[in-house]
Amino acid sequence: MQHDRAGRFVAHCSALVIAVITVSLIAQSSAIAQQGSAIDEWLIWGDEQIRKIIDIPDDKRTFENTVLAIDDIQVRVGIETEMLQFMPYVSPDPAEREAGELAIEAWSDWDIRFEKNEAIYYAVRAYADTNPRLTGERERLLDRMMRDYRREGMDLPADKRDRLREIELEHTKLSIEFDRNIRDDETTVLLSIDELDGVPDEFIANLDRIGGLVMVGMDYPTYGPIMDQCRNETTRRKLWLTRKRRGGQRNVDVLEKLIRLRAEKAHLLGYDNLVDYKTEVRMAGNAEAIRAFYDTLRPIVRKKSQVDYEQFLQAKRDYTRNPDTTIHTWDYGFYLNLLKKTEYALDEEKVRPYFPLDRVIDGLFSITQSLYGIEYRDVTAEAGTAERPLWHEDVRLFEVWDKATGRMLGEFYIDLHPRPNKYTGAAQWGIIPRKAWSDGTVNTPVAALVCNFTKPTADKPSLLQHDEVVTFFHEFGHLLHTILTEADIAAFSGTRVELDFVEMPSQMFENWAWDRDVLRTFARHYETSEPLPDELLDAMLAARNLASGMAAEFQIFLGTVDLAYHSDPDGEVDTTELGLQIYDDILVWDAVPGTYFQASFGHLTGYEAGYYGYQWSLVYACDMFQRFNDAGLLNPKAGMDYRKRVLAKGGTMDGMDIVREYLGREPDTAAFLKHLGLETE
């Protein structure tokens, strides 16, 4: 997943670095607090610049002083405030998180006023009416600006525009609240040692205790391994139910308010529902295209999913020696793990020692530096300032340099371990975009990669499950898209592309974490440095499509739920009841009353009416990967071609045009179905 405001939205440190970080954290805390008040100054500055644009006589308007000036203002304000707005997701300091949330709200309110400023709209329209002869990014920016003004209701009567402004201000507040409720949820389940039967003792030893009970949190590094290994079905059920209630009924209520506001906005703008409004400017084009995509895919996926289900059911009957038992969704991880062991001789716990985090980072860095002609430089020791903050001792900062030109291309942070009040998933934030200024200087992009991998202990480094390695590669694919852009206008920088295209580079890059030759470059035992044995690697690759039908069907379920929530004409949706109905309709599992997974479905703010994009863009990712695969995954020539023809483009072209240009033909679904291990016949 990636976050980007414009889209609407570790190797162990040395003692010296840790000392620098510790000192700098104290100094920068007050600096960030001061930045919280400075945001008001920058918003005032932005208002002054807006007035300057408005005051230009229409016959004196140029692309530079009107259209490009708008991009300039938004980028300048963003550069000065975006880091503060990122803090609610990562800072351990509650005061910084609160200041960041206030900054998000202040910036969003200002941005809404900017977008709804009638005088600015008339200024841009006056310039557009001259039919200027523009090309490339400049032509695209003016076209997109006029399109977006229409989509923001600037041609509507004043009373409707006022209501749209009210809706968007309220939407911002509710979105912040929804995200906060997920992030701050500290639900813990107390379990006895007996209830954790099958979970390794060393894993349990690292969990907190109260009295004689073990405290099990809902963060994935804790939850996942227990669900995969605990023999006690009652425990698995208890944990699954608890995780499916994160965010609480309060987030259900917040979500349903958001859905009503979104529906009202769509109606005011002349659309039947939010899905029609959102898809108009995406690759899909309209809701019918998405439904047709799912209608084609579902029966194919169901055949494999049913085979998967029967395989899991038989595994449970064999394991429990009960021919009449049934299988439930909380059994999934345990029997997936069991089938890997029994059918593929694959023990995930024996794989984990070959993926120490520091080696994974070194391998990932080495591969991408070679492929894309770049160099990463660790500058953590030089950071820890207000301009380059280090919000926690786990955080590291890297510069990215182009080997051919010797130019610095951008910077990125990595923040890889869980802690209280931190964002709980895995995501890349495009914090600052690339921007070429009129004086010839270039503002280089800044990104942050946030994950939640198990922390190292006193006697053992952080060891990743292979699916966590895949996640790391996925998010790094977003990061490369952000950093390697060559767009000159910030509106098209990096991941500022169609939402149903943005997951293409990230999903494509997952393939590197499954390639035999790639894995051999870094997968080594953390104690002996022995490479991942062939028998384990063979088992991993053979088991790749185990349960692929059920996994794909779950993705279809999430996308369908998102579309259903946002297709209701009035937005009057009982999200819990509708979610359970769709669960029963799409999945082989039975729905479980009393759960409300949507309360912690973070994609419903920022990706609303867009979750389908994961499967949609995966079609193109699989097709494009075949071309890369033919040339070689470690082939620098292929890497540079992909860098220039896809990653560098950002949003300067439509996503479909990028795909066609890279493939040299129309895309098709054959590689996608092969990737899932599915057959069409």
Image: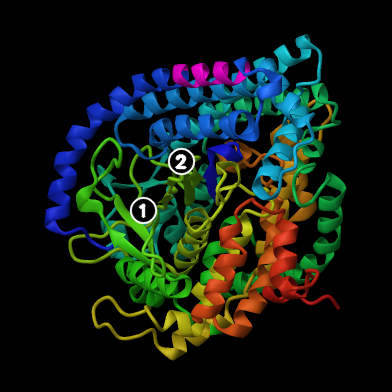
Q: Residues within 10 Å of mark 1 (few under 14, many from 20)?
A: some
Q: Which amino acid does the dot numbered 2 rest on?
A: Asp
Is any part of residue 595 visible from this angle? no
* Residue 551 percent location from the top left of the image: 65, 63
Using residue 67 as the reference point, say whether residue 208 is left or right of it.
left
Residue beneath the point at 83% across and 45% down: 287
Q: Residues within 10 Å of mark 2 (few under 14, many from 20)?
A: few
Q: Which amino acid does the dot numbered 1 rest on?
A: Ile
Name the residue beneath numbered marker 1. Answer: 414
Give the structural element (helix, strand or loop) at label 2: loop
Which quarter of the figure has residue 63?
A: top right
Using residue 92 as the reference point, say whether residue 551 is left or right of it.
right
Of the pair 579 and 572, the residue shown nearer to us: 572
Vertical comparison of 600 with 614: above or below: above
Residue beneath the point at 83% across and 75% down: 680
Q: CA distance from mark 2 to mark 1?
A: 32 Å
Residue that protrudes farthest toward the bottom in the picture = 534
Of the pair 62 and 651, the residue shown nearer to us: 62
Name the residue beneath numbered marker 2. Answer: 439
Which portion, as a residue range, is magenta? 44-54
Cβ atoms at labels 2 and 1 below 8 Å apart: no
